[in-house]
Image: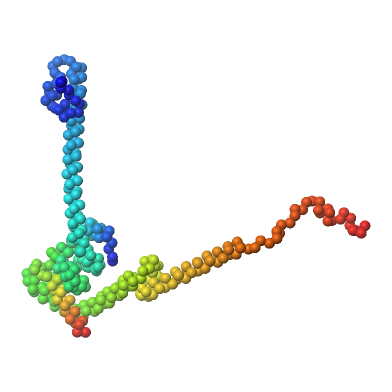
Amino acid sequence: MNLTKEDRQSIASSENLAGMIKHIKAKDSDKKEGLNLGNIAEKLAQRRAKNKQEG
Amino acid sequence: MTEETKPGSATAGSPDEVIQKGPDANSGEPGEASQAQQPEAGADEEAQKSEQLSKENEELNRKLGVQGQELGDYREFVRNISPVLDKLDEQPELIQAIVDGKIDSELAKAVMEGKVQVGEATQVSDAHDKVKKDMGDKKYEKASPEDIEQRISSELDKHKKEIDKKFAESEELGEFRKGVEGFIANTPDFAEYADQVTEFLEKRPNIDDIEVAYNAVKGLDLQKKSADEQAKQAGNNAKDLAANAGGGASQGGQLVDGDMVDDLIASKADPNL
């Protein structure tokens, strides 16, 4: 999906971006404070990369 | 110099003046009072209009200022958001994952920074949801972040094979998509045939190679163009042939008048008579 300049402006100005932010905020509020899912995902990615490298 | 009262001037309709020059209610001369009041009433009205215009002008200027500020804020917002939009542009799966409610701010950050793939982020999110559901709200509330992280890791390990398989498929799909995008990017006239290629692929679900579809569509199109060109050329040739045809002797005959029949056909049955 290649967004044109008009699409970008539309996203920025319309409810799309606001909707996405709302989803992210809802997900943030749905989890334990102090729990960093980004770190867990990073560990998973590193493990996958290592496994792939080892064949 | 006499001081004239100009209608429309700000002072002309001042309340004090109206009071000073106003008709005496007890004078008993209503006609005279009315005549004196008319220009002053007009001046008062003009002053009110002027004041109203001034207020409206002030209000418009204020609104213009507010709108200018909003426009400035909006432009800055778009400028700031552009890098994020660039990332989203490159990763439609991320938009889908966000809309599906699978991504929180840390996962979004990790994906944006290229540390993890969208698939990894959604797997972690799914594992977290499962852990939370299995624990129940109360237990989840009481648990420490470390404990929950441990449970999520265990959950991910439990489905490691399944996850790895999904990733392999996802990577394969990603490579396939990259291949398609690369072919489109490196084929200058692809846009010309894009609609026909789409139609071609829709009609033939067993074909998934974009290059095959493109070549087929282009080949058919070129064949058609060639046939059209040949037909056009044949038409032109026929026209040329007709135009170049040499003129021979006139085939036109003389006009025959009615007497010629009588000249050629004898009036007697036996010509020897």
The colour scheme applied to this rendered structure is rainbow
Farthest residue, direction bottom: A55
Q: Nearer the viewer, residue B109 or B199?
A: B109
Question: In this rendering, is residue B200 above or below B29?
Answer: below
Spot occupied by residue B85 in the image (x, y as percentages of width and height): 22, 63
Spot occupied by residue B207 in the image (x, y as percentages of width and height): 37, 75
Q: Nearer the viewer, residue B168 or B192?
A: B192
- Is residue B140 in view from this perspective? no
- Residue depicted at x 18% and y 20%: B36
Question: Which of the 4 quarters of the picture holds residue B103?
Answer: bottom left
Q: Nearer the viewer, residue B29 or B258?
A: B258
Spot occupied by residue B270 in the image (x, y as percentages of width and height): 90, 58
Question: Which of the 4 quarters of the picture holds residue B87?
Answer: bottom left
- Is residue B222 in view from this perspective? yes
Q: Nearer the viewer, residue B129 or B138?
A: B129
- Label count reads 0
Question: In this rendering, is residue B177 above or below B251?
Answer: below
Farthest residue, direction right: B273
